[in-house]
Image: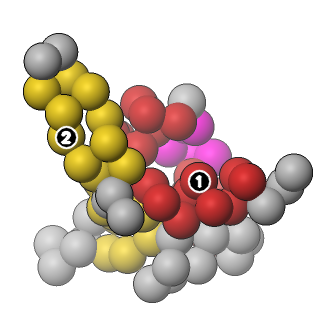
Amino acid sequence: MAKEIEMGNLMVQLQWVLLPMFCSLTGYTEKAVRRKIEDGVWLQGKHYRKAPDGRITLDIQEYYKWVEQAE
């Protein structure tokens, strides 16, 4: 299920987002995200994927699951 984001009068459902958008939504820096990927905290195919053009995309839903597991 995709995360719903309200943008003015527009409701948008997001699942996979590019790294800059992910950082804007979560407050993580690009460096912090890349470190979590390098350290194996976030897994390829689950938390992130590389798009056909090589850019990193992140799954918002898996991010929320990761955050909630800490409770």
Q: Is residue 11 above or below residue 18?
A: above
- Say left or right for 53 vs 6: left
At horizontal 41% and vertical 31% (from top left) the residue drawn is 24
Residue tagged 2: 12
Write the residue at 41% across / 44% down: 22
Q: Is residue 44 above or below residue 5?
A: below
Residue situated furthest bottom in the rendering: 45
Identity, as a three-letter code, of the amino acid under mark 2: Val
Q: Which residue is mark 1?
A: 64
Label the magenta part by its dominant secondary structure.
helix
| Front residue of 33 and 47 | 47
State the separation of the CA atoms marked 2 and 1: 17 Å
Q: Secondary structure at mark 2?
A: strand
- Amino acid type for the residue under numbered disc 1: Tyr
Residue at horizontal 63 percent and vertical 61 percent from the top:
65
**Mark 1 closeness class: few <14, some 14–19, many ≥20 residues within 10 Å:** few
Neighbour class for label 2 at 10 Å: few (<14), some, many (≥20)? few
Q: Secondary structure at mark 1?
A: helix
Asked whether 34 falls inside the magenta stretch, the response is no
| Residue 56 picture location, percent across and down | 35, 64
